[in-house]
Image (tube, rainbow, N blue to C red):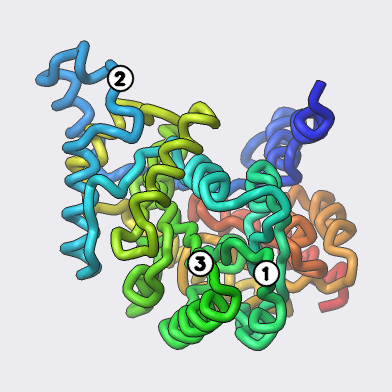
């Protein structure tokens, strides 16, 4: 056996372990008495146009073509629809020949890092970060270096990054809106990041790539805007998924967009194609390629998540908990009232509250609460949160 693969397969992630525990607990005490905030699984239905489009495709398209193979990098008409939307929505150069269709953002990231990293390279990201980044980077033969963010805002600390970038740095990986904090990196942060990467690329006489993980791009509240990274930094690769925007996590559909203006862009794109081939990520699901081509610019009703955020964050602050206000995604990153976040999560289980320790996200002393659940469950959970706060002396 490959020992590393055995270790990955023999132990589920903390989030998946909690999810399974929740199902077991629901059988014991009833599902209505378990408050599972562990998994980032959208609770809002896909837009009606998704169902209508699927029905239309199934009724009108040639079944052999609809369910058959596409080109390895994806159907050209689908890639063109995406490229046209990127150009129209963000005002940046785009090209269907620089888009690679994937089975969701996880495949996008794994392919991209494998395309740009060599053995011994480094990928830099920022705490808190999605737990699987370490797995993706190490699969590409690289080392993941996680840097602390500004403790008050969870924005990127440019001074810390400036000191960390070195000769082996192949890429900087960011996620905005962020899982697990919900923080959106503002334009000022992105401008400083881009200038630093240009400066370091010149200093080390190499290209340092900016890889942006964007499954939550559309999930922002109020007037908040998510800067489109290719506007600010030439050597950017966008990894996108429709899992959250269209509430389709189980359909595994997304794409990689290589900025056509990047240095040696064609070589970079061909490396993406090669990595997809080597990893077996070719020909993303045909039916859902056709679907998303017709659903560009559409998203689920994110006002539901905003209402959930306001209800839960407001109540938790009233009970004495602390958290940074999330401007996007559907997570609260709450400071645990004790140093050991794992112990706090175990304490929460007594009240059937399933919370994820922040240790796996690189931030000790925090917990993640996914509020992409029903409003009713949030309301029913509030007395349990209050009791937990009282037990902790808040």
**CA gap, disc 2 and disc 3:** 35 Å
For the residue pair 172 and 302, the one nearer the viewer reads as: 172
Q: Which mark is residue 69?
A: 2
Q: Judge left or right: residue 226 versus residue 390.
A: left
Q: Judge left or right: residue 226 versus residue 143.
A: left
* Vertical side of 121 occupied by 352: above or below: above
Q: Residues within 10 Å of mark 1 (few under 14, many from 20)?
A: some
**2 or 3: tag closer to the N-terminus:** 2
Looking at this view, name the residue that lies furthest to the front.
Answer: 205
Location of residue 282 by image quarter: top left
To which residue does mark 1 refer?
A: 167
**3 or 1: tag closer to the N-terminus:** 1
* Vertical side of 213 occupied by 319: above or below: below
Location of residue 45 by image quarter: top left
* Residue 186 in the image, given as x and y percentages of width and height: 45, 81
For the residue pair 43 and 261, the one nearer the viewer reads as: 261
To which residue does mark 3 refer?
A: 207
């Amino acid at each position: 056996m490959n020992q590393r693969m055995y270790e990955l397969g023999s132990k589920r992630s903390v989030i998946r372990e909690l999810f399974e525990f929740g199902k077991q607990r629901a059988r014991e005490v009833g599902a209505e008495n378990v408050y599972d905030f562990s998994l980032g699984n959208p609770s809002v239905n896909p837009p009606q146009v998704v169902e209508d489009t699927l029905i239309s495709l199934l009724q009108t398209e040639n079944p052999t073509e609809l369910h058959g193979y596409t080109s390895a990098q994806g159907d050209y008409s689908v890639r063109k629809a995406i490229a046209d939307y990127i150009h129209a929505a963000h005002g940046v150069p785009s090209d269907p020949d620089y888009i690679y269709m994937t089975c969701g953002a996880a495949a996008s990231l794994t392919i991209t890092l494998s395309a740009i990293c060599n053995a011994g390279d480094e990928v830099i990201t920022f705490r808190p970060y999605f737990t699987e980044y370490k797995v993706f980077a190490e699969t590409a033969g690289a080392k993941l270096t996680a840097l602390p963010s500004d403790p008050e805002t969870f924005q990127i600390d440019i001074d810390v990054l400036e000191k960390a970038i070195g000769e082996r740095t192949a890429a900087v990986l960011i996620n905005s809106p962020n899982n697990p904090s919900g923080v959106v990196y503002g334009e000022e942060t992105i401008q400083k990041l881009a200038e630093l990467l240009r400066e370091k690329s010149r200093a080390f006489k190499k290209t340092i790539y900016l890889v942006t993980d964007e499954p939550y791009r559309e999930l922002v509240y109020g007037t908040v805007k998510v800067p489109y990274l290719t506007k600010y930094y030439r050597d950017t690769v966008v990894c996108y998924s429709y899992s959250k925007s269209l509430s389709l996590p189980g359909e595994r559909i997304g794409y990689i967009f290589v900025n056509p203006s990047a240095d040696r862009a064609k070589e970079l794109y061909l490396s993406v194609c090669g990595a997809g081939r080597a990893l077996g990520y070719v020909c993303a699901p045909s039916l859902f390629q056709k679907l998303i081509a017709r659903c560009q610019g559409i998203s689920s009703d994110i006002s539901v998540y905003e209402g959930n955020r306001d209800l839960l964050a407001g109540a938790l602050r009233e009970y004495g908990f602390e958290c940074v206000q999330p401007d996007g995604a559907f997570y609260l990153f709450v400071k645990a009232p004790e140093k050991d976040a794992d112990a706090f999560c175990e304490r929460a289980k007594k009240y059937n509250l399933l919370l994820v320790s922040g240790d796996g996200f690189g931030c000790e002393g925090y917990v993640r609460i996914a509020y992409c659940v029903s409003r009713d469950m949030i309301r029913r959970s509030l007395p349990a949160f209050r009791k937990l706060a009282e037990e902790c002396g808040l």
